[in-house]
Amino acid sequence: MNPAIEVKNLGKTYGSVTAIDDLSLTINPGEIFGLLGPNGAGKSTTLRILITVLKPTSGTATVLGHDVVEEPDTVRSLIGYVPQERAIDRFLTGREHLQLLGDLYHLPKAQATQRIQELLKLVDLEEHADRTAKTYSGGMKRKLDIACGLLPNPKIVFLDEPTLGLDVHSRLRIWDHIRQLRKQGITIVMTTNYLEEADQLCDRLAIIDQGKIKVIGTPKELKAGLGGDSLSLTVKESQLDKLDRLSEGVKTLSFVRNIRTIDNGLDIRVESPEKSLPAVLEVANRIDCQVDGIEYHRPRLDDVFVSFTGHALKGEYPDPVEE
């Protein structure tokens, strides 16, 4: 099977600033592939190179076998793009947005009319198609964005932060629409800095930090690769001076795979959860360190991110911009 997208040693610099550095990845046809990382990690730069808006400083990238630098027009004819910033005219109706795009794509009128009706149904905007966009909620505007990106009937769709600023209900509906696109055989490439979104949606993902790919895999593989459950232990502020001794004592336990100091305690990766809690508490008691709280959980995607980057990803959802 030929890859949908192939990236080799891709780099992009702006003067002395390196946006992405030596990125290599392969995206398979029909999968949802995520680029997960914080703002400024290089996700959007990578996306803009793949949609031919930016030229790379080094390396190569092909989309369905076509070089993004040598064959940009061909690449553009094969893809759809939904930007992070909404390109909505508040005084046009949803249908008028799509009709205008149809004219820009030079679609025959009959074909455009049929395609627009199909897309309005796909994104659940049939009943609202003739309302002006200023009356749309944030979720409805995002659905219209997606419909606009799908109008040319692309083989690959690029989504830049598809649920940024949406309320919970709208976010879940957008997820359903993205899954529906995959069922139709469309390859989806999306950027996100939301851990839950990457975990729930992506067949595979690449964690990007400071312009470099740290790891690629399925969410399940990446979590399983950590090799143990997590025990997070916190202590009172008055006990922080005992953390180093506590860490040294916990390291001697045979079932401890890894240990990391956090703001007010320790994050401990363990092999045997049934043995870990009493043994860790025994170490704390031995050095007279008062434990304030303990949290136990199976490996999560945020644990994977911390393991490969050394820091947490602030992937909480912000307050919605609009209802």
Image (cartoon, rainbow, N blue to C red):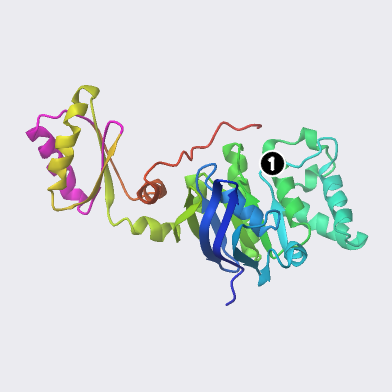
Q: As shown in the figure, which amino acid type bears the numbered disc 1?
A: Glu
Residue 246, position as x, y percentages in the image: 16, 37
Number of marks in the rendered image: 1
Range shown magenta: 263-292
Q: Which residue is mark 1?
A: 85
Q: Is residue 284 magenta?
A: yes
Q: Residue furthest front?
A: 16
In the image: residue 137, left or right of residue 195: right
Q: Is residue 79 magenta?
A: no
Q: Which residue is rendered at x = 40% and y = 46% of the image?
A: 302
Say which of 115 and 34 sits in front. Answer: 34
Q: Residue furthest right?
A: 109
Q: Which residue is rendered at x = 22% and y = 54% of the image?
A: 271
Q: Residue furthest left?
A: 286
Residue 19, position as x, y percentages in the image: 56, 49
**Quadrant (top left/top right/bottom left/bottom right) for the N terminus:** bottom right
